[in-house]
Amino acid sequence: MILRYNLFTIIWAAVILLTTLLPSSSMPSVSVWDLISFDSFAHASMFAVLCFLMIVGLTKQYTLPKLKHYAIRMSLFVSTMFGIAIEILQFSVVPGRSAEIMDIVSNSIGCLIGIVFFRWIYTW
């Protein structure tokens, strides 16, 4: 049952993985200042959606009650670790790409935004 309720989370994580692991030749060329603001916003947005979907999926599943109870904490942890893993993969696997601390920070901020959206939508 846990996979059924987290199908959208898994699909979204696959989209994030595919888009962030593109070689640097596939990336559009923009100026550095445009890239910093757009890149941070894109990372935060993608991870806000990921964390939100994961929280929703984990709270709806009933197979693992502890996971349901700690859905927000687990989603924050898994989403943040996923972002760190992507940066490590970019550094070690994808030619022309490098790991950036600001991407990890943007991913983590996005996860926190996803939690805020979840709380805002589901507690009102």
Image (spheres, grey):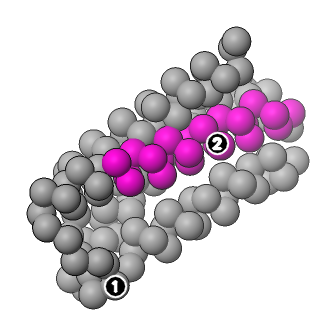
- Few, some or many C-alpha atoms within 10 Å of disc 2 (few <14, some 14-19, many ≥20)? many
Residue depth check, mark 1 versus mark 2: number of the one nearer the observer = 1
Secondary structure mostly taken by the magenta-highlighted segment of the chain: helix
What is the spatial separation of the Cα atoms under label 1 and label 2, in whole angstroms? 29 Å
Q: Going by the image, does 27 lie left or right of 75?
A: left
Specify which label sits upstream in the sequence, 1 or 2. Answer: 1
Residue 60 on the magenta segment: yes
Whether residue 7 is visible, yes or no, is: yes
Q: Nearer the viewer, residue 85 or 101?
A: 101
Figure check: 68 above or below 40: above
- Residue to which mark 2 is pinned: 54
Amino acid type indicated by mark 2: Met
Q: Nearer the viewer, residue 19 or 33?
A: 33
Q: Going by the image, does 33 lie left or right of 105?
A: left
Amino acid type indicated by mark 1: Ser
Quick check: marks 1 and 2 in contact, CB under 8 Å?
no
Residue drawn at x 31%, y 62% as measured from the top left: 87
Pick the quarter of the image with the C terminus.
top right
Figure check: 93 above or below 115: below
Q: Bounds of the magenta span?
A: 41-62
x and y percentages locating residue 105 in the rendered image? 27, 42
- Residue to which mark 1 is pinned: 26
Secondary structure under the numbered disc 1 in the rendered image: helix
- Which residue in the rendered view is the most extreme toward the left? 32
